Image (cartoon, rainbow, N blue to C red):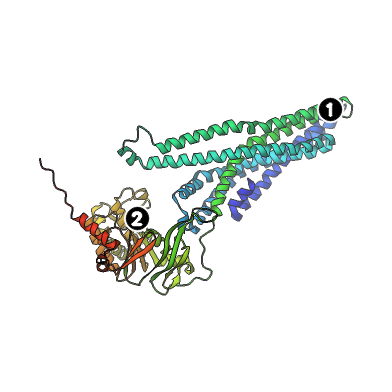
Amino acid sequence: MIRQLYRVLGPEGSRPLNRLVLLQSGAAVLQGVAFALLVPVLKALLSTDPDDVWPWLTAFTGCVLVYAALQGAAISGGFAVGSQLSRVLHRRMADQALSLPLGWFTAGRTAEFSRLAGQNVIQVMSTPAHLLRPFLTSLLTPVTLVVATFFFDARTALVLLACVPVLFAVQQASTALMRRLDLGRDAAIGESADRVLEYTRNQPVLRAFGRTADGYGALDDALAAEARADRRLIVRGLPGLVSFTFATRLVFALLLALGVSWQLEGSLTAPTLLALLVLLVRLIDSVASAAEAGAGMRIARNTLERLGAVLDEPPFPQPAEPKTPRDASVEFSGVGFRYDTGAADGASARPVLNDVTFRLPERSMTALVGPSGAGKTTVASLIARFRDATEGTVRIGGVDVREIAADDLAAHVSLVFQDVYLFDGTIEENVRIAAPDAEPAELAEAASLSGLDRVLEELPDGWGTKVGEGGARLSGGQRQRVSVARALLKDAPVLVLDEATAALDQENEALFAEAVRTLADRKTLLVIAHRLSTVVHADQILVLEDGEITERGTHNDLVTADGTYASFWQRRSRAHGWRLEAARS
């Protein structure tokens, strides 16, 4: 466990931990010395000259006082170091989150990252005060007592040494068993937590379909699985929990029998036997406490291993010698992309894009259309280098995006996705994330181009309107326009709009389409949309199907080509021809 703790803390967090370990180790050794001094104290008291006890009693008292001082410092230091470790871990996790590719943050990994940064960091924070000290005491105090036993009776010490491998084997076996059960229970608890969160978030849907009374099957199954994991831990773990304690009691019984036999045969005096028995009781109690600390140590080790796995994730590779794009053109050359599913041979990697080649000229508008799941959003993520292409090359301004520094690439590309997330603050604060020092005129222009100015006119607090967590106080269309305004305020030369009009009504969609045509005169635009009215004026339209570009051209070219795009357009035209008539009585 200590090795994993040092691993996740890194050099910064290791220094205060080193000092604490030395302090706690010193206290544990002194406790063993104090227990060992009880042997000469008792021997002197039970001898024919009890006055010989004073030197030993003085040494014992001095040792106890120093131990008390060290132990007090170790206890208070444990809490202080725990607070430091919390800050270090949160900082390391934040730095790691910034270095990981955005493709790493799947829904499951994001939930796990949230748990680690929350409750699991709190568990690690308590480790120095509540786990590390008992662990070091249960390890170093018995070692000190075994060494001291050699000075009083070498035979007893040798028997103890012979029993150490047996106790170690029993402890390792019980720890391995309990660790497997703990891991299974942790997985069940994590699944239950995910389903509870899902259940609370989806209350509108569940209530709309009357699923509140009968329960939610996924949550019920997860809770049942957690209960089964708890029962397995209790039933199967019981032998592991009692085996080590039983083994230590057998060792004490063996030493008691040997001590009595040695005393009866005259090779061990009665006072020495009594003193050794007191020492052995303290030794066995100290060893037995290791089993009690074992459960907490196992849980801490599991937590630390999960933290270490996240912190050890390789960061997104950055160029050793960054290059600067010469313009705002975008080019895909034979690009392929596969989602790695984790198979060792890569055979089950899911292909998304295959030999995709196109060019977005500077200051032009390109539309990317196609059925759901065709890979359109993946194209957008490759331009921003949220992921790296597995085949081919993506270039901006003639430079491979993998050779552009992260900050430079971020300055060149702005994106607006269909799924909008707003931070809990005002509308102005959310828009200014893109450019905190933007002038009021720049803010007003971004609001005008995105249609956000009309939203602000309807809200009593205007720019100062609180959006709530995730933008919950705004409608979907309002959140979308805040997101678009944020991207426009960034003023990057390449702008990618991925379903940016999905939450807009027809009137606002038309206004936004006009703004997009204006932006095309000064930016490289890639517009991904299902609503074809948004893209009819594009300089070129690319049709993406099953990860491949199947058609390209202007709107008029593709409508007359009688292909996929023409089929999309005909269906849209028929849908716009529908009318709802009032029912006649």
Q: Would you say residue 81 is visible in this rendering? A: yes
**Placement of 525 over or under 37, stated as above or below:** below
Left-right relation of 207 to 510: right
**Placement of 545 over or under 154, stated as above or below:** below
**Placement of 294 over or under 350, stated as above or below:** above
Q: How many marks?
A: 2
Q: Would you say residue 62 is visible in this rendering? A: no
For badge 1, the amino acid type reads Pro
x and y percent of residue 8 in the render? 58, 51
x and y percent of residue 263 in the render? 86, 26
Per the rendering, the mark at residue 271 is 1
Farthest residue, direction front: 562
Q: Label 1, secondary structure: give it.
A: helix
Q: Which residue is at 62% across, 38% downward?
A: 177
Q: Which residue is at 29% across, 55% downward?
A: 502
Q: Nearer the viewer, mark 1 or mark 2?
A: 2
For badge 2, the amino acid type reads Ser
Which quadrant is the C terminus positioned in? top left
Which quadrant is the N terminus positioned in? top right
Q: Which residue is at 51% across, 65% downward?
A: 318
x and y percent of residue 47 in the render? 86, 27
Earlier sequence position, callout 1 versus callout 2: 1
Q: Which residue is at 75% across, 36% downward?
A: 34
The residue pinned by badge 2 equals 372
Farthest residue, direction left: 585
Q: Quote the CA–CA distance across marks 1 and 2.
A: 87 Å
138, 511: nearer the viewer = 511
Left-right relation of 220 to 84: left
Farthest residue, direction right: 266
